[in-house]
Image (spheres, helix red, strand yellow):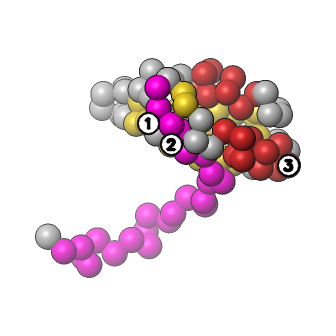
Amino acid sequence: MNIYVSNLGYSVSDEDLKGLFAGHGAVSSAKVIMDKLTNQSRGFGFVEMADDNAGQKAIKELNGIMVDGRSIKVSEARPKENRSNRDFNSRRY
């Protein structure tokens, strides 16, 4: 199960994120998304858990808790949007 975690503090690392979820089941991977230019956290990340039941339990128990002084939001990740489907000409400026 792929899990989306938002409102992370800028000091939260991949290992911190993995440790947060490890108490709820086996974590396959944990990645805090970094800005390519500044190499600073963008404030969100993804956690992959092998067991869907453990993932659902983690979402339920971790959503809204305080981490690094911030209330995190935890939910099941949506599939990545295909960028070619975006209509850039429809934007209003």
Q: Which residue is labeled 3 in the image?
A: 53
Report helix, strand or loop for mark 1.
strand
Look at label 1 and name its amino acid: Gly
* Quarter location, residue 87: bottom left
How many neighbours does mark 3 have within 10 angstroms: few (below 14), some (14-19), or many (20 or more)? Answer: few
Residue at 72%, 41% in the rendered image: 61
Q: Residue 25: where, in percent of width, then height?
A: 83, 34
Asked whether residue 5 is in view, the answer is no
Please tell me which residue is depicted at 76% across the width and 27% down the height of the picture: 22
Pinpoint residue 78: horizontal percent, then vertical percent: 60, 59
| Amino acid type indicated by mark 3 | Asn
Q: Residue 23, relative to residue 76: is it above or below?
A: above
Instruction: Indicate the quadrant where residue 51 lies.
Output: top right
Q: What residue lies at 37% left-to-right and 27% top-to-bottom?
A: 40
Q: Earlier in the sequence, mark 2 or mark 3?
A: 2
Residue on which the image places disc 2: 6
SS state under label 3: helix
As drawn, the residue found furthest toward the bottom would be: 90
Magenta-colored span: 69-92
Cα distance in 3D space between marks 2 and 3: 21 Å
Q: CA distance from mark 1 to mark 2?
A: 6 Å
Question: Residue tagged by mark 1?
Answer: 43
Q: Residue drawn 53% across and 39% down?
A: 72
Mark 1 is surrounded, within 10 Å at the Cα level, by few (under 14), some (14 to 19) or many (20 or more) other residues, namely: some
Of mark 1 and mark 3, the one earlier in the sequence is: 1
C-alpha separation, residue under disc 1 versus residue under disc 3: 26 Å
Element carrying mark 2? strand
Q: Which mark is residue 73?
A: none
Q: Earlier in the sequence, mark 1 or mark 2?
A: 2
Magenta span has 83?
Answer: yes
Above/below status of 16 relative to 32: above
Do the residues bearing badges 1 and 2 touch, measured as CB atoms within 8 Å? yes
